[in-house]
Image (cartoon, rainbow, N blue to C red):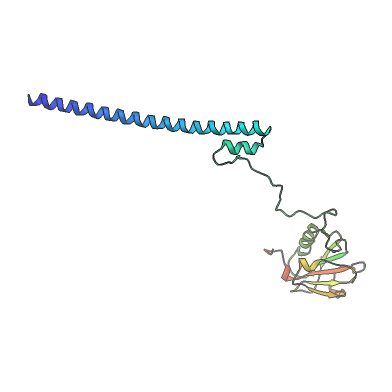
Amino acid sequence: MKNKKSMGSVFLFMFLRTVVIILFLVIVAMGVLLGMQIRQAKKNKKATEARKAVSQNGSADEKQVDELLTADGSTGETVDDGQNTEEQPVTAQDKPDDGTDYDLSLAVLNGTYAEGLAGAWVERLTAKGYTNLHAGDYSDYTSQTTVYIMDENVTTGLTAVFPDAVFIYGSPEAEYVGMDLSGLQAVLVVGESDNIVNGGE
């Protein structure tokens, strides 16, 4: 008799436990379904607002419609602002009107032991708009960049490029220059202070 009561109790307990589990699952399912319905209702509301905006204004900006249809207002598109941070060579049409004579005859001489320094500076100055450059060597080692201005009527604009350079009105010593100075308006002797070769900037 006791065994029958015990078995009945176990059966009742299992039945009640099953009922509780089923009720729990039903509640969870209803919660999920309710959440989905709420999200769908919000989407429908935003779509309705977008359609009203179109009908009221006659037209609507695509971005404005997207802002109504998305929660964060993001269109998900990448905007190209047309800006390019990479330095581009200056052409004759877009040279800055700063008074610089970009067409002056300028010799760029390497006053250091670093090979290719004059050529490197010719490339950099060409990118800045200078058009009449002549690369060469200066046989006397120079620690400080020096600019010799042989034509007082020209504006070299090199103070902006070489702010720490020494500027001298006159000509360098011809014995150290490996080229004919005639016809030149200025001579740039690049010193170690502006060595952009071998790890320089």
Q: Position of residue 145 (x, y in %)?
A: 77, 71
Residue at left offset 19%, top offset 29%:
13
Residue at left offset 76%, top offset 68%:
162
Q: Position of residue 31 (x, y in %)?
A: 39, 32
Residue 3 against residue 121 in the figure, above or below: above
Query: On the image, which quarter does residue 94 sit in?
Result: bottom right
**Viewport quadrant of the C terminus:** bottom right
Q: Residue furthest left?
A: 1
Q: Where is residue 64 in the image (x, y as percent from the top left)?
A: 63, 38
Residue at left offset 58%, top offset 33%:
49
Please name whichever residue, 34 or 13, is drawn nearer the observer in this view of the structure: 34
Q: Does 162 sit left or right of 32 as displayed?
A: right
Q: Which residue lies furthest to the front in this view?
A: 56
Residue 52 against residue 155 in the figure, above or below: above
Query: On the image, which quarter does residue 11 sit in?
Result: top left
Q: Where is residue 50 in the image (x, y as percent from the top left)?
A: 60, 33
Query: On the image, which quarter does residue 66 sit in?
Result: top right
Please name whichever residue, 87 or 143, is drawn nearer the observer in this view of the structure: 87
Q: Please give the count of numbered marks on the rendered protein.
A: 0
**Viewport quadrant of the N terminus:** top left
Residue at left offset 38%, top offset 29%:
30
